[in-house]
């Protein structure tokens, strides 16, 4: 948690979600992912309420309400807003920002991943921010080492068991803007990985995947770890790191990024990691009032492991009903794993009655 900074100097460029951050950096500007600022603010709930006072309806996504107020609170002068491939509510949010003098630059991921359309969008972003494709490509190359470190962090989570699900989530989610300073981010990440490398491995009893937008719920990962379950695959957070496209060019990198395109690319990615990482279950997080909730049925139908759909609305800890649902899900996974035979009774899976899963 941190106090919101003053970003009114004109050098900071807000982002409503992941965009080709290389372009912002190539322009000599400072990228700011408003999502990360919002959720790590001292009182994100107050930001949501401020948006309601400004006229945002309660039936609008909590992230959108929080983003709107965060941009105003930090005094940011311009925002790159993703108008396709992220969220239709962004359109109206842009208009309300424009009405209070914030410049908005639209960026649209083409739904079907059309190469030429994406090329045009990146070119337009370069022109809007006053840089060139070549300069952005040079930044992309410079970012490869820090993206490699993020891939190492992920490996140390699911293979070496030295990094928690919460740590995995937090570091990866910050790769959308590298906290505005990739060099410093890289140094801090190196130091963290050194510390984590010295830890004793702590294999979890249950291996979970997390699919969907990052949670507005603040204690989900810790709640799971406290019950012997660890998220060893964070779908979108991992996508933000561009881990699958380190050796390609700028255009290919943002074509390989699954978040903004059809759900079927996401399903391929999720299923690949379910098998690779031997996941026991999947938590599909959905945000209240988000169109992505409709995709829940496709995810449930397409993966071969149990799925818990978990919904969040406002920032804060898990509510009592969600805690019960998560606990029941973990218990069912433990039972399923036992039924599966010798592999399912591996060390670390508690027996019924003394498992801690289900403890409040
Ligand atoms: S959670 Fe859904 S509704 Fe909310 S900002 Fe993200 S895409 Fe939009």
Image: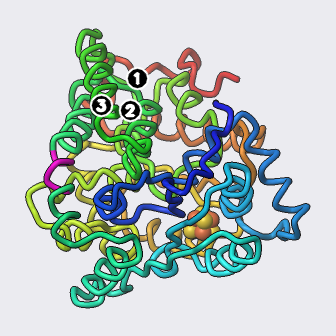
- Residue 169 image offset from top left, x and y in percent: 43, 39
* Residue highlighted by disc 3: 157
SS majority, magenta: helix
The crowd level at tag 1 (other Cα within 10 Å; few <14, some 14-19, many 20+) is some
- Residue 286 image offset from top left, x and y in percent: 59, 60
Q: Which badge, 2 or 1, is on the more N-terminal residue? A: 2
Task: Depth check: give the residue in front, 32 or 345.
Answer: 32
Q: In the figure, 188 relative to 252: above or below? A: above
* Residue highlighted by disc 1: 349
Judged from the image, the secondary structure of the residue bearing numbered disc 3 is: helix
Tell me which residue sits at (21%, 36%) in the image: 149
> Is residue 327 magenta-colored?
no
Q: Is residue 174 left or right of residue 136?
A: right
CA distance for labels 1 and 3 = 19 Å
Tell me which residue sits at (69%, 80%) in the image: 95
Ligand 1 picture quarter: bottom right
């Amino acid at each position: 948690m941190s106090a919101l900074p003053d970003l009114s100097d004109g050098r900071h460029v807000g982002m409503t979600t992941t965009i080709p951050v290389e372009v912002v950096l190539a322009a000599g500007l400072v990228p700011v992912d408003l999502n990360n600022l919002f959720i790590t603010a001292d009182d994100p709930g107050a930001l949501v309420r401020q948006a309601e006072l400004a006229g945002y309806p309660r039936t609008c996504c909590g992230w959108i309400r929080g983003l709107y107020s965060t941009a105003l609170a930090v005094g940011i002068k311009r925002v790159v807003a993703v108008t396709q491939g992220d969220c239709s509510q962004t359109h109206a949010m842009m208009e309300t920002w424009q009405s209070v003098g914030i410049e908005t630059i639209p960026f649209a991921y083409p739904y079907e991943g059309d190469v030429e359309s994406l090329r045009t969008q990146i070119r337009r972003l370069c022109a809007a921010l006053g840089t060139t494709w070549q300069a952005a490509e040079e930044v992309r190359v410079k970012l490869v080492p820090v993206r490699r470190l993020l891939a190492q962090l992920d490996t140390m989570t699911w293979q070496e068991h030295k990094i928690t699900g919460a740590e995995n989530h937090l570091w990866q989610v910050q790769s959308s803007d590298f906290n505005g300073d990739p060099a410093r981010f890289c140094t801090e990440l190196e130091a963290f990985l050194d510390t984590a490398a010295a830890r004793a491995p702590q294999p979890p009893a249950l291996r979970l995947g997390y699919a969907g937008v990052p949670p507005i719920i603040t204690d989900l990962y810790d709640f799971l770890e406290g019950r012997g379950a660890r998220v060893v695959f964070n779908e979108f957070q991992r996508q933000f790191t561009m881990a699958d496209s380190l050796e390609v060019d700028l255009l290919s990198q943002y074509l390989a990024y699954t978040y903004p395109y059809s759900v079927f690319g996401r399903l391929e990615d999720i299923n690949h990691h379910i098998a690779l990482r031997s996941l026991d279950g999947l938590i599909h997080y959905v945000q209240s009032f988000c169109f992505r909730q409709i995709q829940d049925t496709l995810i449930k139908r397409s993966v071969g492991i149990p799925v818990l759909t978990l919904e969040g609305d406002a920032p804060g800890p898990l509510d009592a009903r969600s805690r019960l649902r998560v606990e029941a899900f973990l218990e069912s996974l433990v039972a399923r794993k036992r039924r599966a035979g010798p592999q399912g009774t591996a060390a670390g899976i508690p027996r019924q009655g003394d498992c801690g899963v289900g403890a409040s």
